[in-house]
């Protein structure tokens, strides 16, 4: 083989690697789920009337902010697979699944479940709800209203005022003792039986809105502070609307959620995540 051919082959290989990384940059889930077809945000907007958009989040998240015309089939529902199978019998349009953002893997898991059931023509729109609302307010519904004014979405500053890193979250929650309530709002797939504060927390998924409202009312009545965490710190942003409507002012969220908490704990204990092959999603 000539030197020229070798160099040409090396350049092609480097080009392929570069293009792959460029495509996956900012989308960590694409590397973890390489067999899942994805749809870019501009393409979904272009094809919005030719596809069926499925919101895989909880009903609370969906009713707070959604892509206009989307169906809500929560992936946490044990009948999720049966429901998308029934949906496919009603339409041959492409099914496009979405969740909150680029760190949320529910859209990939939804397509994976569809593939397992041999349901074809399915895609993950993995940029998520936040990017969509900013880019296409005319195709977004906020608290039942459309089109939306992006300024009506609770700002990052409003959200960040209630954020605590995992250490501060833990310290303050335990320092307050009986005057605090800790809630894990992850769904069963994210939680996988492992809570962060097993002896003190309550597990209430975002789908159980009645129980959440009861806890909010209790916190207001007893003047207790809420400490709430999810998987990666994104879902709680939608919960903030319900908390504010309940009249609660003393509440905090864990920055980057349980994933960051467990990652930090493992690093501090000297546990090598790459060697163990652990995936905290």
Image (tube, rainbow, N blue to C red):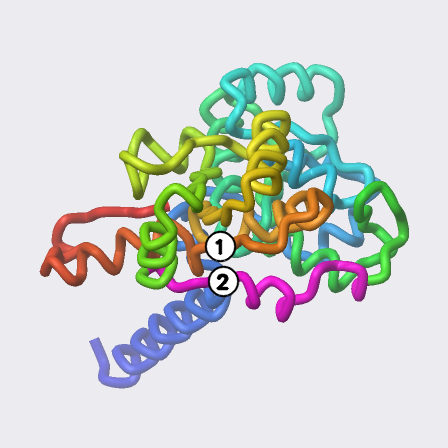
Q: Position of residue 57 (x, y in %)?
A: 60, 37
Q: Earlier in the sequence, mark 2 or mark 1?
A: 2
- Residue 14 located left or right of residue 96: left
Q: Is residue 165 magenta?
A: yes
Q: Is residue 192 magenta?
A: no
Q: What segment is highlighted magenta in the picture?
A: 150-166
**Does the residue at mark 2 contact the one at mark 1 (Cβ under 8 Å)?**
yes
Q: Is residue 122 visible?
A: no
- Residue 138 located left or right of residue 57: right
Identity of the residue furthest to the left in this view: 270
Identity of the residue furthest to the front in this view: 222
- Camera-side residue of 198 and 105: 198
- Camera-side residue of 182 and 123: 182
Q: Position of residue 199 (x, y in %)?
A: 27, 34
- Residue 157 located left or right of residue 267: right
Q: Quadrant of the N terminus?
A: bottom left
- Camera-side residue of 171 and 278: 171
Q: How many marks?
A: 2
Q: Please give the name of the residue rendered at 60% of the width and 38% of the height, measured from the top-left corner.
A: 221
Label number found at residue 253: 1
Residue 269: image quadrant is bottom left
Residue 41 in the image: above or below residue 184 = below
- Residue 258 located left or right of residue 87: left
Q: Position of residue 25 (x, y in %)?
A: 47, 67
Mark 2 highlights which residue? Answer: 163
Q: How far separated are the C-alphas under marks 2 and 1?
A: 5 Å
């Amino acid at each position: 083989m000539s030197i020229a051919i070798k160099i040409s082959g090396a350049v092609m290989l480097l080009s392929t690697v570069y293009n792959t990384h460029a495509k996956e940059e900012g989308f960590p889930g694409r590397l973890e789920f390489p067999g899942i077809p994805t749809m870019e945000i501009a393409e979904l907007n272009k094809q919005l009337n030719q596809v069926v958009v499925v919101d895989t989040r909880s009903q609370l998240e969906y009713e707070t902010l959604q892509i206009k015309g989307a169906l809500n089939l929560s992936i946490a529902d044990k009948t999720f697979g049966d429901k998308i199978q029934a949906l496919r019998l009603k339409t041959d349009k492409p099914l496009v699944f979405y969740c909150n953002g680029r760190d949320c893997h529910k859209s990939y898991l939804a397509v994976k479940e569809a593939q397992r059931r041999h349901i074809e023509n399915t895609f993950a729109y993995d940029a998520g709800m936040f990017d969509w609302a900013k880019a296409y307010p005319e195709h977004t519904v906020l608290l039942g209203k459309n089109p939306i004014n992006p300024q009506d979405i609770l700002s990052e500053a409003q959200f960040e005022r209630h954020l605590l890193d995992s250490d501060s979250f833990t310290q303050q929650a335990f320092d307050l003792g009986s005057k605090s309530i800790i809630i894990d709002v992850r769904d069963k797939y994210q939680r996988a039986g492992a809570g962060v504060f097993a002896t003190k927390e309550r597990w209430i998924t975002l789908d159980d809105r009645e129980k959440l409202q009861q806890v909010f009312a209790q916190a207001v009545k007893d003047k207790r502070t809420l400490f709430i965490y999810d998987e990666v710190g994104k879902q709680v942003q939608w919960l903030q609307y319900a908390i504010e409507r309940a009249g609660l002012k003393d509440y905090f969220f864990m920055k980057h959620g349980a994933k960051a908490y467990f990652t930090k704990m493992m690093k501090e204990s000297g546990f090598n995540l790459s060697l163990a092959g652990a995936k905290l999603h």
